Image (cartoon, helix red, strand yellow):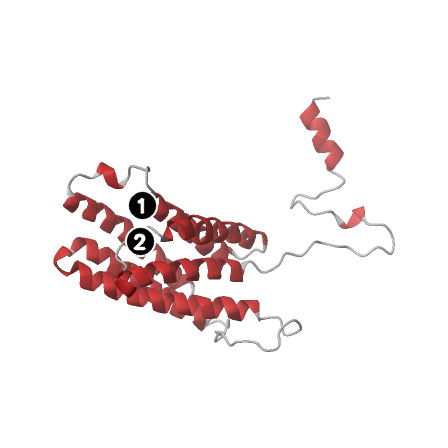
Amino acid sequence: MRPALGLARLLEPLYDGRGQPPPAGYGLGQTQYYRKLGNPGPLGLFGFASTTFILSMYNVQARGVTHPNVVIGMALFVGGIAQFVAGMWEFATQNTFGATAFTMYGGFWMSFATIFLPGSGVLDAYADEDELNSALGIYLMTWFIVTFLLFVASLRRNLGLVVLFFFLTITFLLLGLSHFLTASAVALEKAGGAFGIITALVAFYVGTAELLSDPINSWFVLPLGQISKGRID
């Protein structure tokens, strides 16, 4: 018997095709037990919100800050890795929308940090400033498209997510245009930063609402504006 085949046959009585113990694996009178996962939503939303808030404050030049380099650590580890793993856990809870959004934006923050990471050589590769602006504009407009599609997908989830993705879509659009319309770059970047701050505050709210969603363990709950899931045809 081949080792791989032997192992498969050995495990066959323990797990069904979906990776779960079959009912037959439990004796008479035993209750089936499946380990439950916590809600990864607050982790992903707080990681996204905090990193977006910091960068957006820099984009509006709060307290005279014009260089975004301090956000690199946040983008790599909080907006990046923490949000990425939240997306992986959303897959385990069968939330495809949350998994897609958190994993995509976790990847976005890590890719964004790489651009400004000293030694990455990304910015140094562009000797022409116009070429760099075009490259960054295309990069941000691509995320505008991704965000718009997620906005469409959020329309029947809850109002909190709808508002979040609406403002995030505008944020990416303005930031992308700031690299194409260089004559108005500062004004567009500040406008994008302002919408980014609003987006971050909405994300903080939605994350807190999900964190407090269990009435047994919370003193109060926050409304998210649930949308009816009834058919509209």
For disc 2, the neighbor class at 10 Å (few under 14, some 14 to 19, many from 20) is some
Q: Is residue 232 above or below residue 114?
A: below
Identified at 71% across, 30% down, the residue is 7
Q: Is residue 208 above or below residue 59?
A: below
User: Three-letter amino acid code at disc 2?
Assistant: Pro
The numbered mark at residue 81 is none
Specify the quadrant of the image occupied by residue 192: bottom left
Q: Residue furthest top?
A: 1
Residue 41 versus residue 233: which sits nearer the camera?
41
Q: Residue furthest left?
A: 183
Identified at 30% across, 62% down, the residue is 171
* Spot occupied by residue 71 in the image (x, y as percentages of width and height): 37, 53
User: Three-letter amino acid code at disc 1?
Assistant: Phe
Left or right of 15 on screen, residue 187? left
Residue 63 versus residue 84: which sits nearer the camera?
63
Q: Residue furthest front?
A: 63
Q: Quadrant of the N terminus?
A: top right
Identified at 80% across, 46% down, the residue is 25
Give the residue at mark 1: 116
Q: Is residue 210 above or below residue 130?
A: below
Q: Earlier in the sequence, mark 2 or mark 1?
A: 2
Q: Is residue 12 above or below residue 137?
A: above
The numbered mark at residue 68 is 2
Identified at 52% across, 71% down, the residue is 209
Q: Would you say residue 104 is visible in this rendering?
A: no
Whether the residues at callouts 2 and 1 have beta carbons within 8 Å, the answer is yes
Specify the quadrant of the image occupied by residue 128: top left
* Spot occupied by residue 72 in the image (x, y as percentages of width and height): 37, 49
Q: Secondary structure at mark 2?
A: loop
Q: Would you say residue 138 is visible in this rendering?
A: yes
How far, Cα to Cα, is label 2 from label 1? 8 Å
